[in-house]
Image: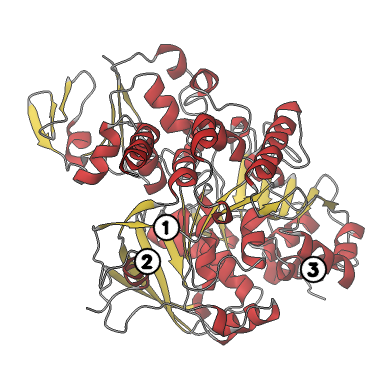
Amino acid sequence: MNVWVYGDDINTDMLFPGKYTYTCSTPEEIKPHLLEDLDPGFAGAVQAGDIILAGKNFGCGSSREQPSVGLKSVGITAVVAKSFARIFYRSAINQGLLLVECPDAVEAFKPGDTLDLDVETGRISVGSREFTFPQLPERILSIRNAGGLLPFTRNLLKEREDVS
Amino acid sequence: MPMTFAEKILAARSGRESAAPGEIVTIQPDYLLSHDNTAAIIGKISDELEEYGVARPEMHIIVLDHVIPAANEKAATNHHKIRAYVARNEIPHFFDIGSGICHQVVMEEGFALPGHVLVGSDSHTCSYGALGAFSTGIDRTEAAALLLTGETWFKVPKSIKITLKGNLTPPVSAKDLILSLIGLLGADGADYRSVEFHGSIAGLTMDDRMTIANMGVEMGAKCFAFPVDRLTREWFSDRGFEPDSYEPVWADVAANYEREIDVDLGEIGPVVSLPHTVDNVKPVEDAVGMVVHQCLLGTCTNGRYSDLQVAAKILRGNTVSDGVRLLVLPASREILNQAIQSGVASDLIQAGAVLLPPGCGPCLGAHQGVLAPGERCISTANRNFKGRMGCKEAEIVLASPATVAASALTGRITDPREVEIS
């Protein structure tokens, strides 16, 4: 498991350049360009189970969803940041991607530290130190737990159909 | 309980007496906007659309603006799919290429009425707060789910109150004001907040308010909002929407704001956002003399008639500097037509401008003016992120229409107070 560490205000153009927005939509098309203008080595080296650690306002900028779709599809376990921009925050819920808002954990992290997450209890360990992070409201958690908004919506439509 | 604009509108539209920050409410928005990304949105749910259809076809507004006319086969195919979806599902509010930039079209067509709730699969959907509507950006997946269900959830935001006093001193403009505010609060200064403007707004034209609200997302805001006043009502009346056709919503006097900021408009001067973040705001004096290769006048931030007019007054009878490309991007067909009829378009073209079709043009780096490594563009758009205009080794400086026009004349970033205005 690798931890990818980035700074403040990582915007959506850094996560996925706007020039590809209308030519790349599927995970396969997105992956080679993920973080292209921020960290050209990322797309080739990222592995399932990796974690991204970043500063404040992660995901600011455009409403394009290639960043959240792409990070989910390459198997990023979570993005841990000091704070998130709101459209990206919603988009991550919609893709079933775990975001952990925990400024103390980001501050505490030093290269080489282990990073462990317990989603159920909302705890994150950095080396020997432990922090807690806020859980999503129950109703929103059910979207992420369904695997994202589209599976959630499909279930909802089926339920409504069954009732009627 | 006294409520802010955001609290009041979210309470009313979710059938509640009140709404407090942090609460989650379900709302059926009046409209859902999407643009060229409609192809990707409907592609996610093609089976479900077949089975269930579009929940509320009249809710869906589609404006083709991002890559128009199609720059390549992929864009052309996307446009083709969108037109087929419109025909098959009888989507009444479809605007094909050349109509304008989606946000301008939504406002001109009267979809963003005061008190309305709109969501759009575009981050600058926050623009409609200029007209007293609640509007915010969402991603493609959420737009797809909305097509199937017609509803979505909102977390009631905390609110920030900005009280204005005084007046801007031309050539200082609304763009200088909003860039200054973003510099003051930072790129995340209003993250997940409703930003509501109070005080002396009468000195801000409707175009000014649209420029300001357009950039709300650049400080992280969920929405920006202006109260409805005489200017708003006149703007709507001119378009055939009389005051009895909408119900304005505004904050209570005793509403609880997380933060209150007072701004004296008379103290705002011309500013620029230097590369590569929008909140890297400096007085224009700090940037004077920097060489520019391209000047972009227009976009959903500053592509309205008054913006083109300000630039024309500076450029009329002059020519842009050697080595500078001036691109003009009107925000809609209506604006382009007005600029042609009044002679403003001719003033710009005779000064050397390249007139682009009403759309997003080079703003997001897809076509029509992509930058080369080492080049610098001064632009009236809303983002200067690295790589935004198609090249990560290029620089983008954000400024007002007057500063961009003045810089086009000299080939260097120029203080608009230093040039003659006809």
Instruction: Decide which of tag 2 and tag 3 comes sooner along the chain.
Output: 2
- Please state the chain letter of the residue tagged with numbered disc 1 in the rendered image: B
Query: What residue do we see at 51% from left, 24% from top?
Result: A36
Pointer 3 and pointer 1: residues touching (CB < 8 Å)? Answer: no
Instruction: Decide which of tag 2 and tag 1 comes sooner along the chain.
Output: 2
Residue located beneath label 1 in the image: B28
Query: What residue do we see at 71% from left, 47% from top?
Result: B292
Relative to A29, is A164 on the left or the right? left
Query: What residue do we see at 64% from left, 32% from top?
Result: B391
Relative to B182, is A120 on the left or the right? left
Pointer 2 and pointer 1: residues touching (CB < 8 Å)? Answer: yes
Q: Residues within 10 Å of mark 1 (few under 14, many from 20)?
A: some
Is A141 rendered above or below residue B189? above
Identity of the amino acid at label 1?
Gln
Residue located beneath label 3 in the image: B314
Q: Image quadrant for the C terminus of chain B?
A: bottom right
Identity of the amino acid at label 3?
Ile
Residue B280 marker? none
x, y (%) of residue B48?
A: 49, 34
Q: Secondary structure at mark 2?
A: helix
Residue located beneath label 2 in the image: B13
Is A62 rendered above or below residue B230? above
Q: Which quarter of the picture shows residue B262?
A: bottom left
Q: Secondary structure at mark 3?
A: helix
Is B168 rendered above or below residue A131? below
